[in-house]
Image (cartoon, helix red, strand yellow):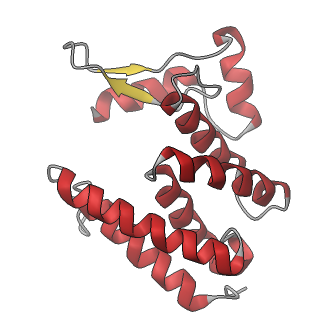
Amino acid sequence: MPPQLPTVADELLRRLAADQYARGVRDDGSLAGPDFELMRTVDAENCAALQRIINEHGWPGHSLVGEQAAHAAWLIAQHAELDFQLRALGLLRDAVDRDEATPTQLAYLTDRCLMRQQRPQLYGTQYQDSGDGRGMQLWDVADPDTLDARRVEVGLGPQAEYEAAIRSTY
């Protein structure tokens, strides 16, 4: 089924491409160093555009913009300032309840918001490099004994596998 708002979908996909380019991901899959100044500019522009889209249409979910563009909207929210992320979190939660977004997306944005608030995350999706030479470290997790059970509930694999992937990437 085609998206209800194809022009909005196209805009979100263009913005995703700019987001990824600023972060060093090239169209051919190669990686370059991130351009932090460009990231700040692109993130601010993307956030303003997503804010406008939300104000006009609500959360851009699967039926409005298609799965790829809905994913782009989620990623733009992931890279926004905390105040916008918190607003998006509520909208995304409602979208998940209506099958317009995925529980995995909600888990990632939940953890990102918690980390940015200096609180323990729930799903173990967020890592940070503290600059102490240890590389990427898992941000604190609430109730680590039940982490994998929470991850399964939202469609994520075991934490050990995710950690191995993070370590191989970074």
Q: How many marks?
A: 0
Residue 31 appears anywhere in the view: no
Q: Is residue 165 above or below residue 44?
A: above
**Which quadrant is home to the C terminus?**
top left
Who's the residue at 26% across and 54% down the image?
Answer: 23
| Image quadrant occupied by the N terminus | bottom right
Q: Residue at x 49, y 57 (%)?
A: 75
Residue at figure coordinates x 63%, y 55% from the top left: 88
Closer-to-camera residue (77/26): 77
> Which of the 4 quarters of the picture holds residue 123?
top right
Q: In front: 168, or 131?
A: 131
The percent position of residue 129, horizontal first and vertical second, equals 30, 24
In the image, residue 57 sits, relative to residue 100, either above or below, namely below
Q: Toward which corner of the image does residue 146 lie, by quadrant? A: top right
Given residues 123 and 164, the one toward you in this image is 123
Q: From this view, report whether residue 48 is shown above or below residue 39.
A: below
Q: Give the residue furthest to the front.
A: 83
Horizontal side of residue 119 vs 64, given as left or right: left
Q: x and y percent of residue 29 in the render? A: 26, 61
- Kindly indicate the quadrant of the structure image that contains residue 9: bottom right
Which x, y percent locates residue 121? 59, 25
The residue that appears at 67% across and 21% down in the rendered structure is 148
Left or right: 75, with 43 as reference point: right
Residue 132 at least partly seen: yes
**Residue 93 in the image, given as x and y percentages of width and height:** 76, 51
Q: Residue furthest right?
A: 98
